[in-house]
Amino acid sequence: MFKRAALISLAFSLLLTAAASAQAPKKKKRALVKPGPKAKQELVKPEPKTKEDILKTVERPVPPREGFIGRVLNAITIDTSRGPVIPFPVADSSKDLGPSVGIMPVLALKKKKTGEIRSVLVPSVTYNKNLRTTLTYRHYIFPDDKRYFILRASKSERVERELMAYYYTPGLFRSNIRLSVEAKHWITGKPSFYGYGINSEHGDKANYSLRMTGEEIIADIPLIKNLFFNFNHSYFDKRIGVGPVDNGQVKEEFPADYAAASEMAAFHTNRFSLVYDDTDHPFLPKIGTYASASVLYSNKRLGSDYEYRTYALQVKHYYNYKEEGRFVTAAHYLLQFQRGDTLPFYAMPQLGESTGLRMTGDGRFTDRGKFVFTLEERITLSKTPFYKFISETEIAPFIDVGTVFSKVSGFRLRDLKYGPGVSARLVIRPQLVATVDFAYGSEGTNAIIKIGYPF
């Protein structure tokens, strides 16, 4: 839940700070976009790229055409001598934990003498029936115009905790190498386990909490135009415990798996990725292709408790009809599989709500490998400027297709799960999209409120 809440929180922060003079889409040359966090697999939080991305609209702008949303934002904004305070609402929903609601004020702190912004505070209070009340504190600190720190702490009445420190620099030793370093202690109570394989039973659903403590270092190195090398190192101690949901626990439903997974295990991994990226935007792409081939390895001689490799091939393609931006066909392919030691179920490839199959909850299908294909038709219905933003309303019918398998040769077309649905989205350029997904299929229906595109 904290990973998801952090994603929502950062995205709403960007809503404040991302209003550089956005333009309606037009034909243009594709900009060189470094892959950054997209080189990671699955859903990860998109940290801001620069200080400007965070601060561009902390100072209150004048709306070019004030509509209903502009009047609402003006009405709730509180002007202070240190900067504006805007109390944003927070909403989140998932099949695992249900809805969460709350409030998140954002405050930019300026130097009194110069008026320069050196930090942004983003606290929040949310409520969820399973987690109860959650208090979160976020602090963005800017030592100069390019580097920044993020500090975050969060605590729920039940189960969930987070302490995180993150540092980013876009030019290591005055080079074009981008470096990010993160250290965190994190407990989430969102995931569930149903057993192994594509034939696991939905009725065997069992909740658990996942505890992670460790660090991660990511470096992006440009090679030639549109081609990058990404290195990702991480070391985490992980184990599971009792989760916050009362209708079934892994400890009771899968005692043997719980006994193995509840023991603290060390995961020291290094992933090497070759990335091709000519998309026009890192978070809101409308045209181009992103492709990556990666191998992650874990070795006992380097301090890991398991020896294994994870291979992944991923392609995302965005076809923009006549490059007008109104109709964008988006396709995503992912093949992932592990070789080596058998891992605890939480460290194996999973197929679920945030990992490729929106009709069901997170962790629904677990095995040594998985295949995902998603096709969306993103249709822009309207564009409305407010403040310095360009806001687009979008509807996107989609279909998710996926399966898991114990080995690649065991992949069978008859095992594919299908999850059609439709998304309603508010796109606020240059970096934010708020999404409501409705999906259905053999696992029933699912309604998801979140920040960000699925890919």
Image: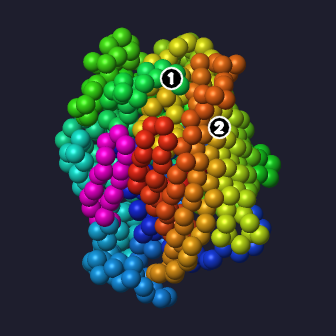
Would residue 136 appear left or right of 149 to someone viewing this image?
left
Q: Of the residues under marks 2 and 1, which one precedes in the sequence?
A: 1
Task: Determine crowd level at label 2: few under 14, some 14-19, many 20+ residues with C-alpha closer than 10 A.
Answer: many
Give the labeled residue for mark 2: 334
Q: Point out residue 147 in the picture as x, y percentages from the top left corner.
A: 51, 56
Q: Looking at the image, is 257 positioned above or below residue 436?
A: above
How many numbered discs? Answer: 2
The residue where tag 1 is placed is 199
- Amino acid type, residue under disc 2 in the picture: Leu
* Residue 63 disc label: none
- Identity of the residue drawn at 36% across and 11% down: 256
> Which quadrant is the N terminus positioned in?
top left
On screen, 93 above or below 83? Answer: above
Q: In terms of depth relative to the viewer, which is nearer, 298 or 312? A: 312
Q: Residue most toward the bottom?
A: 65
Q: In which quadrant of the rendered view does residue 330 lie?
A: bottom right
Alpha-carbon distance for marks 2 and 1?
21 Å
Amino acid type, mark 1: Asn
Q: Nearer the viewer, residue 302 or 329?
A: 329
Q: Is residue 454 magenta?
A: no
At mark 1, the secondary structure is loop
Q: Residue at x 57, y 60 (%)?
A: 396
Q: Is residue 219 visible?
A: no
Magenta range is: 89-106
Residue at 75% over, 73% down: 27
